Amino acid sequence: MENRVSPTPSEPHDLAPEVFLDEVHSFEFWFQAVEGYLSTSPYGRKPELADSDLDESEREALVTTLCNYAIGETAALDASSGLIRIAPNRRAKIFLATQVVDEARHLEVLLHRLRELGVVELEAEVQRRANHSLLSFRNRLLQFVDGRDWEAAVFAQNVILESMEFAVFQAHAERADPITRQVLSGIIKDERRHLGFGENELGRRLHETPHIRNRLQAVKNDLDALVLGTFEDTLEQLRVARSQRPELGRRYLASVERLGFGL
Amino acid sequence: MNDPLQTGALVSKDSPRQRFVLEETGFDEVPVKYRRFYRRWQGPGDSLAPNEVLCPVCKVVIRSTRELRPGDRVYCMPCMSRLVVAVGAEGRLEARVAY
């Protein structure tokens, strides 16, 4: 573990499992990954991209949606930074440090987009438009972190919250104005790492210590109503047709189901 | 999908594996040296070559220089998942997460 250098294989799939895990959890991997899609995109978008004309109702809905994204990203920023201290190993600590940077960037680009949309009092506006289910979810997540409950916190943040964001951001990007779409596309690329970390970390833990399954099922049951409330409100703001919502729900639930958690 | 050596023909497990030359796909979410091993999934109209499987976690297409067969190990670097190639319910190759 200690003396490994970054590998240069002919085929990454030939890496030894431990070398692969060291590689993808490293700050160096993160740095070279985000360089690919962020280096020419200040605030997550190409500077030359022109804003589109939104009517007042479209702008209102977008501001409310982005305010709630900002709440979710702030929750993930607070939680992932707190998780570093209780992470069980060096790999997880280093990965979470990259996640902290990602979440801070997400918050920054979302607030920047809100300013572009004419929001002046950012903090007040975010609070005024906050979804109560999302605020309750945030509080539960931070309780897990404060209680040093690694499995529950990773489950709530990196599996449930990240999967929900992944599904919602993808749906939103498909129908958003060009600038918002580009901002969201960059965030989605980061989310792949976050949700992958959560699913793989918990998958390994469930394999090694199956007795934690019942406790995590209870965590899921506890959070389900809050997730559903947040999901429904957001899809309503995005004007996603009701006929499309079950498919988005399936995308969200897939990772939870792969870990063996039912409805 | 645009590999010069790609044929798409099915082969038996005893026959030599097809080899593939991987070109850049525009995928930019991993370090440069790994980028040609991944590409974006284009949705329902897309299809997988014999050297490709879809990551079930993050929906990125994982590519290899070799034809893939059941039991092969592949890595999804964009979401940090270890996967094993298997035959799915519809007879096609799919990747399953190996925790």
Image: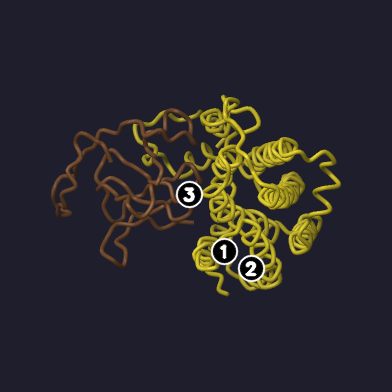
Residue A212: assigned label? 2
The amino acid marked with disc number 3 is: Ser
Chain ID, mark 2: A
Q: Nearer the viewer, residue B15 or A133?
A: A133
Q: Are marks 3 and 2 in contact (CB under 8 Å)?
A: no
- Vertical arrangement, residue A185 with respect to residue A220, above or below: above
Task: Provide the secondary structure element on which disc 1 rests.
Answer: helix
Residue A92 occupies quadrant: top right
Q: Amino acid at mark 2?
A: Ile
Q: Which callout, 3 or 2, points to the residue nearer the camera?
A: 3
Callout 3 environment at 10 Å: few (<14), some (14 to 19), or many (20+)?
many
Task: Output the letter for the chain in yellow.
Answer: A
Q: Are marks 3 and 1 on the same chain?
A: no
Query: Does mark 1 fall on the same chain as mark 2?
Result: yes
Circles 3 and 2 on the same subunit:
no
Which of the colour schemes (rainbow, by chain, secondary structure, one colour) is used?
by chain
Measure the alpha-carbon separation of dots 3 and 1: 16 Å
Residue A206 is tagged as: 1
- Is B57 situated left or right of A222 in this image? left
Residue, x 28% and y 66% (percent of image)?
B90
Three-letter amino acid code of the residue under disc 1: Leu
Q: Residues within 10 Å of mark 2 (few under 14, many from 20)?
A: some
Circle 1 chain: A
Quickly name the residue at label 3. Answer: B81
Quarter of the image for the N terminus of chain A: give it: top right
The colour of chain B is brown
